[in-house]
Amino acid sequence: MLDISFGEFVLIGVVALVVLGPERLPTVARTVGALVARAQRFVATVKADIHQQANLSGLDSLRQDLQDAAHTFRGQLEAEVNEVRQAVDGHAAEARALVDEAAGPLFEAERTIHQSLHPEEAAEAPAAAEAAAPRDENQLDLFDDLPPHHPPASQPSASQARE
């Protein structure tokens, strides 16, 4: 604390005893002790406040760093989400194009199956079927000249065939 030795304290005590006298010395000593204690508490409080402010400024900088990192991460995450959305939209468009491309042959196959199952309806609308599906004259169609398929009139059911 202060560079005062024990001998100097004794000298201060003797001078105080001579100046103040033995009756007032204990009261003055208690008052000086209380003032010194109050000064020590004040210094401790000031130190604690300074330390707290230093920690708060450190925490403020740490909080700012965390907020900057959070904003950066959010930006990166939003960019990644947008890239994924664009990729999904692209794949969805490709899938729609493939569905549209596959719908024509599927429609034609369905029409062919229905014509073979119901030959009387197929005979009524051959011109409508030709108009609905344009033909490529350069493509070889192996099934054009096949006669319509008529299932046998009496087919045994699966339970009758087992018996």
Image (cartoon, rainbow, N blue to C red):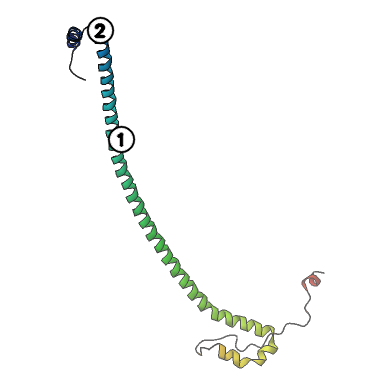
- Residue located beneath label 2 in the image: 23
Lateral position of residue 6 relative to residue 117, left or right? left
- Is 101 located above or below residue 51 in the figure? below
Which quarter shows the C terminus?
Answer: bottom right
Residue 29 in picture, x, y percent from top left: 25, 13
Residue 46 in picture, x, y percent from top left: 27, 30
Q: Secondary structure at mark 2?
A: loop
- Is 33 located above or below residue 160 in the figure? above
Query: Which residue is depicted at the point 56% across and 88% down?
Result: 132
Query: Which residue is depicted at the point 32% across and 41% down?
Result: 59
- Rendering quarter of residue 153: bottom right
* Mark 2 Cα-neighbour bin, 10 Å: few <14, some 14–19, many ≥20: few
- Rendering quarter of residue 30: top left
Residue type indicated by callout 2: Glu
State the separation of the CA atoms marked 2 and 1: 45 Å
The earlier-in-sequence mark between 2 and 1 is 2
